[in-house]
Image (cartoon, rainbow, N blue to C red):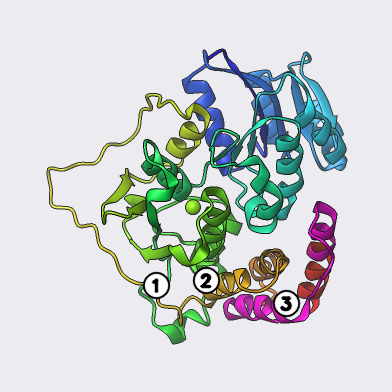
Amino acid sequence: MNTQQLLILGSTGSIGTQTLDIVRAHPEKFELYGLTAKSNWKILADQINELRPAYGLICDEEHFQDLRDAVTHKQTVLLSGEEAMDSLICEDQVDTVVNSLVGFSGFRPTVTALSSGKKVALANKESLVVGGALLAPYLNGNYDRLIPIDSEHSAILQCLTGETINTVDKLIITASGGPFLKWPLDKIASATVNDALNHPNWDMGSKISIDSATMMNKGLEIIEAHWLFGISVDRIEAVIHPQSVIHSMVLFNDGSIKSQMGLPDMRLPIQYALSYPDRWPLESRQMNWESPRELTFEPVDLRKFPCFELALQSTRMDAYSPAILNASNEIAVERFLNREISYIQISEIVAKSLSHINNSDTLSVSSLEDVDRETRAFARVI
Ligand code: MG
């Protein structure tokens, strides 16, 4: 394969910066077409000065001048605003769009990229959670258009390699259980922001860290897997695996289970999404078999993780419910991080939003945006 022209949406976040580590490790495989950031102009400027993409874009227009002043590599064309981002995605030269935007804001760029024929390496699970029905036509049982970066879905994709989907009995998604796995139920209700951000195995952005603590993340991942692999939600299970070594499993119809293992390192699923269907070398920490090691499993305690149950419920409601779930959760997490609400109120806000918001329009990108907007307004004031 020739070099891939990469456009990285959200290059200054946790996934974006690790994607750039992969680019640095394999300079012969990539050309950087563009880097985008929401507002972090300082890191974006450093990345542009070092890696010299053709384009650099900041979404928040108020930081455009800061970015211009900080960029010393004057051959990079600097842009601002979301419309300019849409145009960049559609540029002919772009082969692969890495979507590591956070939340619903990543949905429209995924639609734009797929509809303009790009390959999408997807870290933005919300794209599939809210709009899986609209993205399904691009999937077609092939995984070469929309390739997951999420570690669980990367694991499942690796397990499915060489198999056919009609031999799959179940997908088994592993969950670390987050920081509250061993906490008693009554103590979780009063957990603080710092408690919830303290993830045992993965170092991630603050939104996904809170989603891991509530296990909303695992609920979103089940919905994501449903659309990505075309398997019904009732054939996707979550199991707690506190060591985060087995990243997920597939149970086949002869009783055989395949799993993908490795020490937690997001660079691996990022690289696999970019190399798929090939596998490239990566310098990473290796499993050490010289001392005893336990891999343990336990069921999800639904009393401790109401957000997980709400996510599953949303799939049994109408086509908009996962979008309502997602939007209300984004606002509830933001309010929790701002110390406006308590930990237990996150699930309460999501539950109230699911029962309050309705929509009967035919599903489309703009109808989903309407529902998203309406849900956010509601979730902000309850
Ligand atoms: Mg994940």
Which kind of residue does numbered mark 3 sit on? Answer: Ser
Which kind of residue does numbered mark 2 sit on? Answer: Phe
Q: Position of residue 366 (x, y in %)?
A: 85, 54
Q: Earlier in the sequence, mark 3 or mark 2?
A: 2
Q: Secondary structure at mark 3?
A: helix
Q: Nearer the viewer, residue 197 or 29?
A: 29
Q: Is residue 159 above or below residue 5?
A: below
Q: Is residue 158 above or below residue 282?
A: below
Q: Earlier in the sequence, mark 3 or mark 1?
A: 1
Range covered by the magenta-colored residues: 342-371
* Distance in Å between CA atoms under marks 3 and 2: 15 Å
Tell me the number on the disc at residue 353: 3
Q: Which residue is the site of mark 2?
A: 308
Pointer 2 and pointer 1: residues touching (CB < 8 Å)? yes
* Residue that sits furthest to the front in the current view: 166
Q: Earlier in the sequence, mark 2 or mark 1?
A: 1
Q: Secondary structure at mark 2?
A: helix
* Distance in Å between CA atoms under marks 2 and 1: 9 Å
Q: Is residue 356 magenta?
A: yes
